[in-house]
Amino acid sequence: MKKGKVFLVGAGPGDVGLITVKGLEAIKQAEVILYDRLANPKLLEFALGDCELIYCGKLPDRHILRQENINDLLVEKALEGKIVVRLKGGDPGVFGRVGEEAAALAQYQIPFEIVPGISSGIAAPLYAGIPVTHREHAESFAVVTAHDKSQNGKPKLDWEGLARGVDTIAFYMGVGNLPFICENLMNHGKPATTPVILIQWGTFGRQKTLQGTLTDISEKVLEAKFSNPAIILVGEVISLREKINWFEKKPLYGRQILLARTSANPPSELAKELMNQGADVIEFPKWKKTPLPLAMANVTAYEKIVFASPESVSEFFKAVVEQEIDIRSIRADFFGASIKSMKALKDRGFLAKLTEEMVDSEDILIVGDESILKKGFVKAELMVTSQKELDVQFLPIFKRMLEEADVNTMVFPSSSSVEPFVDALCECGFNAVSLLKEMQVVSMGVQTQAAVIKAGLPTTGMPGHATKEGLVAYLALPVDKGV
């Protein structure tokens, strides 16, 4: 049997936009992905629909899979002839144990590539407004593990070399050993007034920072109950943060948003815009779509064609091209069931109207799925372009995302997003009312708000037009004004 290939990929520090192009290409072709806790789960949404996802997450007090098991799985899946991605947070070569995994693959002569990623020790400080080097403040930089394999977990380091020879030091995952770190740096010559900053969940919208000095930072951490995952940065360069802190000034920084999803394509344009403005966004539910063969022979006979979704537009015209139908022979007027569907048609050069402007008849072809039939189209013909179903493989992933985040905002972008969201939550074992009761729940548009109220959920109607720009402006208001 032909051997597969393994890509050992650095996922970057958290912000999905920081994955490398090569890393994302590997994810898109993978048949199996073994992923860590600190690799942003949103990256998994770019994988193939039938890709096998295996969680290898580790916490300080427990292991889902031990390193030996991970090595064995990589070998096993590759020997089955599959393309395998090992997705690791940050850079795989920086405390990522990639050397052990690569050695296991080499032992079986399995081809592999190592794809570097952006390390959190550099990225998290930058998102906190701190370059790790600067001509006037720091000419040297070191990354250091803050725990080792010893029984007490305290690292055996060249403390004098670090204290006297390195301007900026980044300690990885060392919150538990912080008093030990500070004590050793001061005992070996680092001034007690040296600035220290902890950056938790760096590059995520939920990023938090805690600043002090070598003398007081340990006490501050206890008071604030600060925990991993966090980078501990030590050095005078931290003083630059007051001038160039940029990420935390984004309008939606601190917003952790749960966004009801209707599309099977990740991520939605709305999600991308919210993330660009500084928010964390969890899209749910995750859908799996299977294209269906389309019989296009009679498509020229209809007077009106209704597109139920933006996806149905692309699926319809793909079939037109594949079956060599001359577009000029389609004489029907085009209608969209939503503004997004109309935009998808406009992008192809067709001006469409909303379905509210038409009357049900037998001369209508509905392209998409059966959801639009609920709007009163019972005489029309239906062309189902694809089968969409809940991707149950993502349900445990969604649960972990909720556990690690502190979601404060719920957004329903359309009326059609409400019922599938509530049903999918039930599949996860969540009650929608209980989950949303402490959140600001935003409904985009009057019809959406009506659907949310009908489902028995709390809602805040969004004033103005239900656009991406309007939503960003609304969410940028202080919560007490926005509600």
Image (cartoon, rainbow, N blue to C red):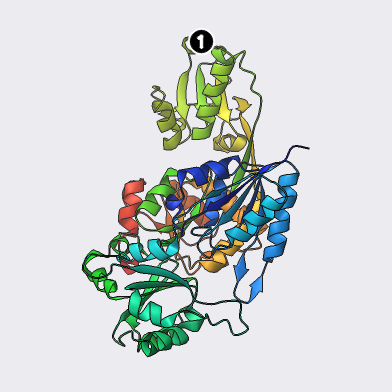
What amino acid is labelled 1 in the image? Answer: Asp
Q: Is residue 335 visible?
A: yes
Q: Quadrant of residue 133?
A: bottom left
Label 1 packing within 10 angstroms: few (<14), some (14-19), many (20+): few
Q: Quadrant of residue 456?
A: bottom right
Secondary element at tag 1: loop
In the rendered image of this protein, does residue 165 appear above or below residue 407?
Answer: below
Q: For the view shown, which residue lies furthest in the right direction?
A: 1
Q: Quadrant of residue 431?
A: bottom right
In the rendered image of this protein, does residue 468 appear above or below residue 408?
Answer: above
Residue positioned 46% across, 59% down in the render: 14
Along the viewing direction, whichever of 354 and 56 lies nearer the viewer: 56
- Assign the C terminus to one quadrant of the image: bottom left
Along the viewing direction, whichever of 300 and 320 lies nearer the viewer: 320
Number of numbered callouts drawn: 1
Q: Is residue 223 visible?
A: no
- Assign the N terminus to one quadrant of the image: top right
Q: Position of residue 136 (x, y in %)?
A: 21, 68
Q: Position of residue 205 (x, y in %)?
A: 40, 62
Residue 26 in the figure: left or right of residue 244? right
In the rendered image of this protein, does residue 481 appear above or below residue 107?
Answer: below
**Circle 1 sits on which residue?**
326
Residue 115 in the figure: left or right of residue 2? left
Q: Position of residue 123 (x, y in %)?
A: 39, 61
Residue positioned 66% across, 70% down in the render: 63
Along the viewing direction, whichever of 384 and 95 lies nearer the viewer: 95
Residue 120 in the figure: left or right of residue 482? right
Q: Position of residue 443 (x, y in %)?
A: 43, 53
